[in-house]
Amino acid sequence: MAGHSGMLEQLIKNYLVTNAKVDPAKFDQPDLMVADLGLDSLAMVEMLFEIEDRFGFQLSDPMHYQSMRFADMVAAIEAEVRAHHNGELPHIDVQGSAVRPQ
């Protein structure tokens, strides 16, 4: 978990706490399951859409994240982002939108 991976995790947490009203304390559980966040399928899709919007591509199989641990979902999303950006995790503003290099 080196590099910017904490940034992606923070983006997802910020989004869920702000938009899906997830209790921030839930993220303290090391084996937190995505299913335990209490997201309905619409909230899940909207969260993933937010990520897609930031990084500029579509995730291949959004619904399989619901059966994962939260940490594994973050890692899986990060792997997909890196695959679309030559192994890099683009720097994004976790509060705002993706910072596009000029």
Image (cartoon, rainbow, N blue to C red):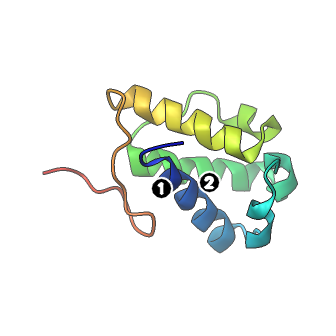
Q: Is residue 7 or residue 56 the one in the foreground?
A: 7
Badge 2 crowding class, 10 Å Cα cut-off, few under 14, some 14 to 19, many 20 or more, is: many
Q: Which residue is mark 2?
A: 47
Q: Is residue 19 left or right of residue 59?
A: right
Q: Is residue 52 above or below residue 82?
A: below
Marker disc for residue 7? 1
Image quarter for residue 67?
top right
Badge 1 crowding class, 10 Å Cα cut-off, few under 14, some 14 to 19, many 20 or more, is: some
Q: Where residue 39 sits in the image (x, y, percent)? A: 79, 56
Residue reaching furthest to the front = 2
Q: Where residue 20 sits in the image (x, y, percent)? A: 71, 67
Q: Is residue 26 visible?
A: yes
Mark 2 lies on a secondary structure that is helix
Q: What residue is rendered at 34% in x and 32% in y?
A: 85
Q: Is residue 71 left or right of residue 60?
A: right
Q: What residue is rendered at 40% in x and 45% in y?
A: 55
Disc 1 marks a residue whose amino acid type is Met
Q: Is residue 93 above or below residue 53?
A: below
Q: Is residue 75 or residue 16 the one in the foreground?
A: 75
Q: Is residue 23 visible?
A: no
